[in-house]
Image (cartoon, rainbow, N blue to C red):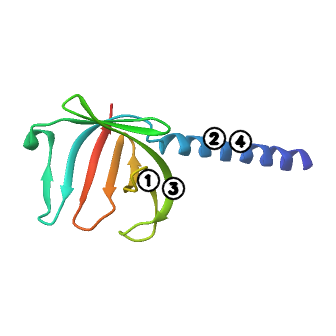
């Protein structure tokens, strides 16, 4: 009986460890992301690469985000990830930029959603390259 109990404890430990690392991996924002669309603003419009005639790519490392528009580097900004109160309600993961700007974010599969933390602003959708 004691061996069975020990075996169950060991198996539960292994399962919980593997799901934790898997969850951390899935929530990573590091990588190259291609812009798909932005929606919002006071008029609730949706913008896409086709409607704007531009492509946007984010290249996210552990400490910096590089933004390219039509393949030209337009910004390189240091950032940190924090948990904080969102204007949309509740606690959210936030990208806090060195210039004091911030965006809440979420990730689903190969999609990254960046939400401008201001009223009448945009939600930006990216797909991982």
Is there CB contact under 8 Å for labels 1 and 3? yes
Is there CB contact under 8 Å for labels 2 and 4? yes
Mark 1 crowd level (few <14, some 14–19, many ≥20, 10 Å Cα): some
Q: Describe the element under mark 3 as helix, strand or loop.
A: strand
Is there CB contact under 8 Å for labels 2 and 1? no
Q: Earlier in the sequence, mark 4 or mark 1?
A: 4
Q: CA distance from mark 2 to mark 1?
A: 29 Å
The answer to which quarter of the image holds residue 88 is bottom left
Q: Which residue is mark 3?
A: 82
- The residue depicted at 85 percent of the width and 50 percent of the height is 5
Q: Which residue is mark 1?
A: 96
Q: CA distance from mark 1 to mark 3?
A: 7 Å
Q: Is residue 9 above or below residue 88?
A: above
Q: Earlier in the sequence, mark 2 or mark 1?
A: 2
Q: CA distance from mark 2 to mark 4?
A: 6 Å
Which of the two marks, 3 or 2, is nearer to us in this view?
Answer: 3
Mark 2 crowd level (few <14, some 14–19, many ≥20, 10 Å Cα): few
- The residue depicted at 14 percent of the width and 37 percent of the height is 54
Mark 4 crowd level (few <14, some 14–19, many ≥20, 10 Å Cα): few
Q: Which residue is mark 2?
A: 18
Which of the two marks, 1 or 3, is nearer to us in this view?
Answer: 1
Q: Earlier in the sequence, mark 1 or mark 3?
A: 3
Query: Looking at the picture, how far across and down is residue 56, in whole percent?
Result: 23, 37
Relative to 28, is 1 on the left or the right? right
Q: Which mark is residue 14?
A: 4
Task: Identify which residue, 44 or 107, lies in the foreground.
Answer: 44
Q: Describe the element under mark 2 as helix, strand or loop.
A: helix
Q: Quadrant of the C terminus?
A: top left
Q: Is residue 124 above or below residue 55?
A: below
Which of the two marks, 2 or 1, is nearer to us in this view?
Answer: 1
Q: Earlier in the sequence, mark 4 or mark 3?
A: 4
Q: Earlier in the sequence, mark 3 or mark 2?
A: 2
């Amino acid at each position: 009986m004691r061996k069975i109990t020990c075996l169950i404890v060991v198996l539960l430990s292994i399962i919980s460890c593997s799901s934790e690392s898997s969850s951390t991996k899935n929530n990573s924002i590091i990588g190259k992301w291609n812009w798909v669309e932005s929606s919002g603003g006071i008029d609730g419009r949706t913008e896409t690469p086709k409607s704007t005639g531009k492509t946007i790519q984010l290249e996210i490392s552990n400490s910096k985000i590089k933004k390219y528009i039509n393949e030209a580097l337009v910004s390189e900004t240091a950032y940190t990830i924090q948990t904080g109160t969102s204007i949309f309600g509740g606690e959210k993961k936030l990208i806090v930029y060195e210039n004091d700007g911030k965006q809440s974010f979420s990730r689903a599969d190969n999609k990254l959603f960046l939400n401008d933390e201001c009223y009448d602003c945009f939600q930006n959708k990216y797909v991982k390259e």
